[in-house]
Every structure is written in structure tokens, then in C-alpha cells.
Amino acid sequence: MDYQGYVHVYTGNGKGKTTAALGLLLRASGAGMTVFLGQFLKRGVYSEHAALALLPGVTVETFGGERGVGTPPTEQDSVLARRGLERLRDVVSSGNWGAVIADEIFVAVHLGLLAETDVLYLLEVRHTSTELVLTGRYAFPKILERADLVTEMKELRHYFSRGVPARKGIEK
């Protein structure tokens, strides 16, 4: 019997979308699955990358430029997002990955770096045995209709509003 993969969406304004995806990644790796994590709008090394490098079967790639949070996207951001999308198309359709995570892909769409149709196409080419996880604020209605699992993170309170910056090991 072939394994049936599903499409997950983690969205909303609350904290925890990437964290939830990383929890699934941890569980999948522990079960012996191969996992690909593609992070849009992020570059360099984040705290989670040190731990992920220790996990068997996990590959992490980032698709972000020099743009800071709250600044307009650059041409470099556009090129890197397109490159990331092409990489995801290959990965999700190959059948070689048990789980594929497209982190912050909805923000890339919101910023105009990718189109909604680009994300929907990933569902079309996804190998049936691949679990596909899509994260980020601003998930659009058509993806919410097509996903098998949708979780909305709702912010009730956040210390960012009191001026607390992102902290290493907690938010970055």
C-alpha cells in the first residue's frame, strides 16, 4: 500500500506557524522520513538550522535576500523566490521526499514575489506520497479550500507589541 500524503496550511497572525512545521519535521525525521524545508524570505543561518543539521534525512534551503522585515521587496528577493519555487516544484514532484515544507510561502505571495497560481501548481505536481506543508500569514482562499488540513494561529497577546525584539532561540 502506498503512503498517502496530505496538504497542510499553517496561517494566521499568531506566533507558531514555522514552529508547528518544524514540529512536524522533527516527527517525520524521527520516523525515518526524508524532509525538505524551503524557507522563503529568509537567508543565512537561523537557530533551528544548527539542530536540523543533526537530524537524519533533513535538507534545509533558504530563498531570501537582504531585505529587512517591513521593507519593500527587491529584485533579488524576486529572483530568489522564483528560484525557490522552481526548487520546490522539483522536490515536491519527485517522490523522493516524505515531507516538504514551504515556509513563509504565503508572505512571498502577499509581497507579489510569487503568484497564487504558483502555489496551487505545487498541489497539482505534488507526488501523492508527499506530505506538503505551507506556512505564512495571508493564506489565500483558494489554498484554504484545497488544503486537507488548515490551522490558523490567532494572536491574543504578543510581547512584540511591548517592543520586545525577536530573540535568538525563541523567534530566530
Image (cartoon, rainbow, N blue to C red):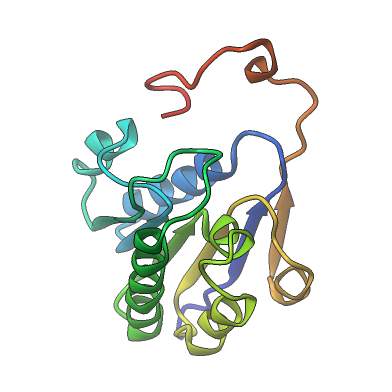
Report the side of 88 relative to 109 (left or right): left
Left or right: residue 137 versus residue 33 is right
Q: How many marks?
A: 0
Identify whether 62 is placed above or below 159.
below
Kindly indicate the quadrant of the structure image that contains residue 115.
Answer: bottom right
How far across and how far down the image is residue 131, in percent? 49, 69
Where 3 sits versus 57, above or below?
below
The one nearer the camera, 83 or 13, is 83
Q: Position of residue 100 (x, y in %)?
A: 42, 65
Quarter of the figure with residue 35: bottom left
Question: Which residue is pictured at 23% across the width and 35% down the height?
Answer: 50
Q: Position of residue 47 (x, y in %)?
A: 31, 30
Residue at screen point 45% across, 60% down = 101
* Pick the front one: 8 or 162: 162
Residue 30 lies left or right of residue 56; in this view the side is right
Residue at position x 51%, y 80% in the image: 122
Q: Is residue 153 above or below residue 77?
A: above
Residue 127 picture location, percent across and down: 44, 85
State the quadrant of the C terminus.
top left
